[in-house]
Image: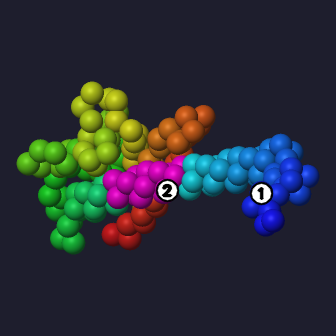
Amino acid sequence: MLKIFKNRSEQRGDTIIEVLVVLAVLGLAIGVSYGIANTSLLSTKGAQENAQATEILQAQLEAVRSMLPNDDGTQSVTDVKKAGPYCVDTSGSSYQTTTGCTFGNDGQIDSTGNGLYTVQITYDGTSTFTLTATWSDIHGQGQDKSTLVYRDYQ
């Protein structure tokens, strides 16, 4: 007679140890994947914040350059060659220097003072403008900083 069922001793199955080892390897793989994805996400967010800060500083620099004396020595707006710290308020019809500058994600001055980026412009008295943006780092444990330096040869 043909045996359809094998004896129990002839059947082979996975032991509980083998199943636990497989589960441990899967858990490790998932944990590593999560860590890599989280690190990548934080790096991307940090890069976005740095890019936004650089854009704000570039806009501030262009405002400063537009406020510098013209080639004929006349000045179109206000004197930006002062010690500072200050920033340029570009929200009105004419540019004005102001203090206490915080900017939101939209790149505009946040009048509530709760903006993400704090911007300061300083002038060294001879020819160099230093523009600095600071903001809380993505971990909330310190400050990130971006700086632009511009030298005016007029």
Q: Is residue 48 magenta?
A: yes
Specify the farthest residue to the top.
112
Say which element carries label 2: helix
Report how many numbered discs are placed on residues in the image.
2
Q: Where is residue 76 drawn, in percent x and y?
A: 14, 58
Label 2 packing within 10 angstroms: few (<14), some (14-19), many (20+): few
Q: Main secondary structure of the magenta part?
A: helix
Describe residue 74's horizontal placement relative to residue 9 as left or right: left
Q: Give the amino acid at mark 1.
A: Phe
Specify the farthest residue to the left.
93
- Range shown magenta: 41-56
Label 1 packing within 10 angstroms: few (<14), some (14-19), many (20+): few
Q: Where is residue 39 drawn, in percent x and y?
A: 60, 51
Q: Where is residue 56 drawn, in percent x and y?
A: 34, 53
**Which residue lies at the image location 12% right of the left edge and 49% below the top edge?**
94
Q: Quadrant of the N terminus?
A: bottom right
Residue 44 is tagged as 2
Q: Return the residue nearer the eye: 49 or 29.
A: 29
Q: Label 1, label 2: how many angstroms apart (C-alpha)?
A: 59 Å
Describe residue 85's horizontal placement relative to residue 41 as left or right: left
N-terminal-most mark, 1 or 2: 1
Q: Is residue 92 visible?
A: yes
Q: Return the residue nearer the eye: 22 or 57.
A: 22
Q: Where is residue 69 drawn, in percent x and y?
A: 23, 62
Say which element carries label 1: loop
Query: Quadrant of the rendered structure where residue 75 is?
Result: bottom left
Q: Which residue is mark 1?
A: 5
**Which residue lies at the image location 42% right of the left edge and 66% below the top edge?**
151
Q: Give the amino acid at mark 2.
A: Thr
**Which residue lies at the image location 31% right of the left edge and 41% below the top edge?**
104
Which circle, 1 or 2, is nearer the viewer?
A: 1
